[in-house]
Image (cartoon, grey):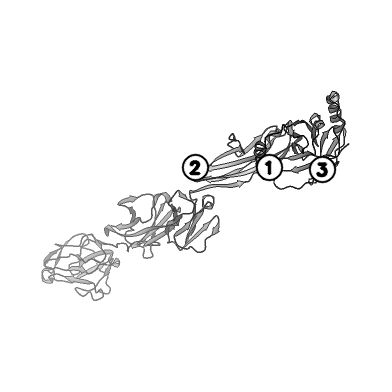
Amino acid sequence: MGSNWIIVSDCSSIFLCVSQGVQAMFTQQPQDLVVVAGQPVTLPCSIPGYHGVVLWIKDGLALGVGRDLSGYPRYTVIGDHSTGEHHLRIQRVELMDDAVFECQAIQAAMRSRPARLTVLVPPEDPVISGGPVVSLRAGDPLNLTCHADNAKPAASIIWIRNGEVLNGAMYSKTLLRDGRRESTVSTLYLSASNIETGQQIICRASNKAVPNGKETSVNIDIQHLPLVNLSVEPQPILEGNLVKFHCSAKANPPVTLYRWAKGGNVIKEVSGDTYEVIVDHSFFTEPVSCEVTNPLGSTNISRNVDVYFGPRMSAEPQSLQVDLGSDAVFNCAWTGNPSLTIVWMKRGSGVVLSNENILTLKAVRQEDAGKYVCRAVVPRVGAGEKEVSLTVNGPPTISSTQTHQALHGEKGEIKCFIRSTPPPDRIVMLESGTSGRYTVETVSTEEGVISTLTMSNIVPADFQTIYNCTAWNSFGSDTEIIRLKEQESLPVAVIIGVAVGALVAFIVLIGTIGAFCCTHLKGVVSAKNDIRVEIVHKDHNAARENEEHTAMKQLMVSVSVLPPFPLLYPT
């Protein structure tokens, strides 16, 4: 035989031949088999009574002569040769064994039916790209890719989470160069809302070689910025007490830095997750912030402290000077915690004028002038107040006791009190008597001007005289008529008592008006406050009293206003 190719023409379709006068036949012949690579397999071939040469053919190629298969170390012909057993044993089947096999009896010119040996190759262990831990940023979707290579047939891939198969994966396969094996790739997409950190996702690859499949898994690691909670204890708290801030954070990757600030200003001396401080009112309006950083970035959270504190002025009211008939508007603002109550009152009056920040006095009158108090109260915490002045520009107003008393032959005084804003430009003390016995003393106080006409050596005519106190400023004038009444003599004891009382009254007066300086004049008197003060004399005539009084007022009104403040001078 010149080649390994055996041509059998007369027994190709029958299994019974005659050789050397003996009838031979196949009692066993190879069958189609499917076997997993790596497993052993035996292809049977029995021809009882045949003692000639038997060949095994693989894809038309003889493997050897008889039982000599030295060219194929994994191949062995086994069985009892004497009984016609010529079985082909293959150890550890490989992909190259995937072929068509025949058993041929050469001398008997017989061949078995062709048997297809199909070799299944399980996929290699599947691999998930990026495993075993897949990290992604919170909010991002998840894309997983799993490949199972070198399988015959191509592997099928499924994804499993929490025991349930995940649908929607994309699937592709690629035929390798050997034309037999294939690689499979599967891609799974999961939206951000459909994944959680710590979840395990399994990729399972299977084919006929491994029906139960091979699997691998990854753990999902969702990375995120620090999730921060800032606690403040205790709350509420009274100003001046200790407060503890605690900044708790969950972060993946872990926290690398804590930074504290108050009102936007960094607190350099604190670096951990806790900050302790004695709080004041500023913690109520200036928040404390904790900034937590990890490799992905920073998260900042801030809290105000519910600090209880007494009223603190945020808008200070200003004293006002307004014209008569105009509106006066005061503005006063306080802060405090808990909520405070604001009260506007006039000093010396218990009447509440407003509970708002703004106090508006409409069309002010001269009696509205004075001190006003803006008071704020924080219940059970504290109170505060601020005083302002209202000055009303208008004509002078004169107040005086209409009848003064004096003793004959003694010194007598007539006083008139002048309230005037602006200060009076001129004051006239008018009398009808003998000149030369009069002096005028003018004292300015916070409340107004006190003008005192002093007469030495009272004579009977002084008790018949009408005294006129008149003052002017740029807004107008006012006049007060005053009389002097003779005082009856009193017993010595009464005189002493009266003297003591007068002394006490004098001390009270001194405490009210303060120290003052004055210049005594005879004829013309100039006070320190530069008010022009005049003493005007005229002859007494009781029958013409009213007419002269009116004429004098007209005369005084017609006189031009001189430089600021009153004078006294005789006519």
Whether residue 56 is visible: yes
Residue 506, numbered circle: 1
Of the residues shown, which amino acid type is indicated by label 3? Pro
Q: Vertically, is 291 above or below 466? A: below
Find the residue positioned furthest to the right: 571
The residue labelled by disc 3 is: 564
**Labels in figure, total:** 3
Coordinates of residue 492 in the picture (x, y in percent): 67, 37
Coordinates of residue 182 in the picture (x, y in percent): 36, 61
Find the residue positioned furthest to the top: 543
Find the residue positioned furthest to the front: 492
Q: Tag 3, which secondary structure?
A: loop
Of the residues shown, which amino acid type is indicated by label 2? Pro
- The mark nearer the N terminus, 1 or 2, is 2
- In the image shown, does 526 or 335 lie closer to the viewer? 526
Residue 1 shown left or right of residue 160 in the figure: left
Q: Residue at position x 54%, y 50% from top?
A: 285
Of the residues shown, which amino acid type is indicated by label 1? Phe
Coordinates of residue 511 in the picture (x, y in percent): 66, 45
Q: Residue at position x 85%, y 42% from top?
A: 524
Question: Where, quadrant-wise, is the N terminus in this rendering?
Answer: bottom left
Whether residue 191 is visible: no
- The mark nearer the N terminus, 2 or 3, is 2
Residue 379, numbered circle: 2
Q: Tag 1, which secondary structure?
A: helix
Can you tell which of label 2 and label 3 is closer to the viewer?
A: 3
Circle 1 residues within 10 Å: few <14, some 14–19, many ≥20: few
Can you tell which of label 1 and label 2 is closer to the viewer?
A: 1
CA distance for labels 1 and 2? 44 Å
